[in-house]
Image (cartoon, helix red, strand yellow):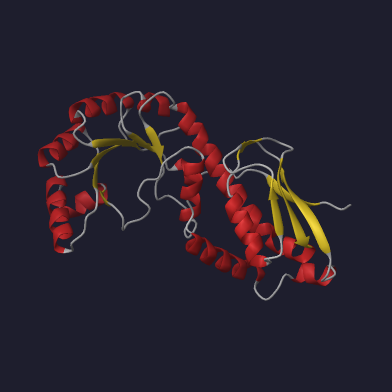
Amino acid sequence: MLDNQELNKFISDALREDVHEGDHSSLASIDKNAQGKARLLVKDKGILCGMEVAKAVFAKVDEDLRVDVHIPEGSTIKYGDVAFHVYGSAISILTAERLVLNCMQRMSGIATKTSEYAKAIEGTKAKVIDTRKTTPNLRFLEKYAVTVGGGFNHRFGLYDMIMLKDNHIDFCGGITKAVHKVHEYLKANNLNLRIEVETRSLENVKEVLNCGGIDRIMLDNFVPEKVKEAVDLINGKYETEASGGITLESIRSFAETGVDFISVGALTHSVKSLDLSLKAEIN
């Protein structure tokens, strides 16, 4: 679910960046009273995402614009489909066009990629989750797109979960010391946050198990066979997450180890946008 306040701020900032004092191309060439109609034409295949964002952008530009949705959010789309029509001021439609397309193309690409990963592990207990490897200031849209594609969100930022990664552990002086310091910090600041610890070897996993006091163990850059060993060793005491260089081709082998979560940065950091186009319809 998208936060309306956050979405509204994003749209305002994005329109300020793009339009500034005016869409001079449209203002100069089109009569101010001209009415128009345009369709969102799909020129690719995948999962449609960003419909609510598109409607919000059109409404922000011109509250009199009307959007008729033909294909619901999260639907499978193919070349030649028409996702929606927009009606109203021709100038307003063109002013909103690029922001609508930039958002929907990117979000649909993420939803499509996520859907591929989610389908690859169907029938296992594992869930595919995203990471913080997102575009600055677009994280809320990109993580929403992951859920539309059938994936799940990990922590949203640095503030809503403790994750002790390799650098935290190395700078602190070890796993056990880091976990103890986290508990002291949470108590001193009256915070209730889940704790995840990254491990790089089975010895690390054993140290976490001996230390305790955490919620999830990340198995970073383990091969599937080692993930299976670690999952068996943890034996349900804590949630488990496989991470690190996991591809569409390899994800099934990780899911079959019995791990709870598989994090994939590629869902957001290296996605091909879907090809969508806004086309004027002239009667």
Image quadrant assignment for residue 36: bottom right
* Residue toward you, 89 or 138: 89
Instruction: Give the percent coordinates (x, y) of residue 193.
Output: 24, 53
Tell which residue pokes out farthest to the right in this image: 283
The residue at the point 29 percent across, 23 percent down is 225
Left or right relative to 265: residue 218: left
* Residue toward you, 58 or 103: 58
Q: Is residue 54 above or below residue 123?
A: below
The residue at the point 63 percent across, 66 percent down is 60
Q: Is residue 72 above or below residue 256?
A: below
Instruction: Give the percent coordinates (x, y) of residue 50.
Output: 58, 50
The residue at the point 56 percent across, 48 percent down is 107
Tell which residue pokes out farthest to the bottom in this image: 21
Q: How many marks?
A: 0
Instruction: Give the percent coordinates (x, y) of residue 168.
Output: 23, 52
Q: Is residue 123 above or below residue 112?
A: above
Tell which residue pokes out farthest to the left in this image: 210
The residue at the point 14 percent across, 37 percent down is 209
Image quadrant assignment for residue 192: bottom left
Query: Can residue 248 be seen by looking at this rendering?
Result: no
Query: Can residue 136 be seen by looking at this rendering?
Result: yes
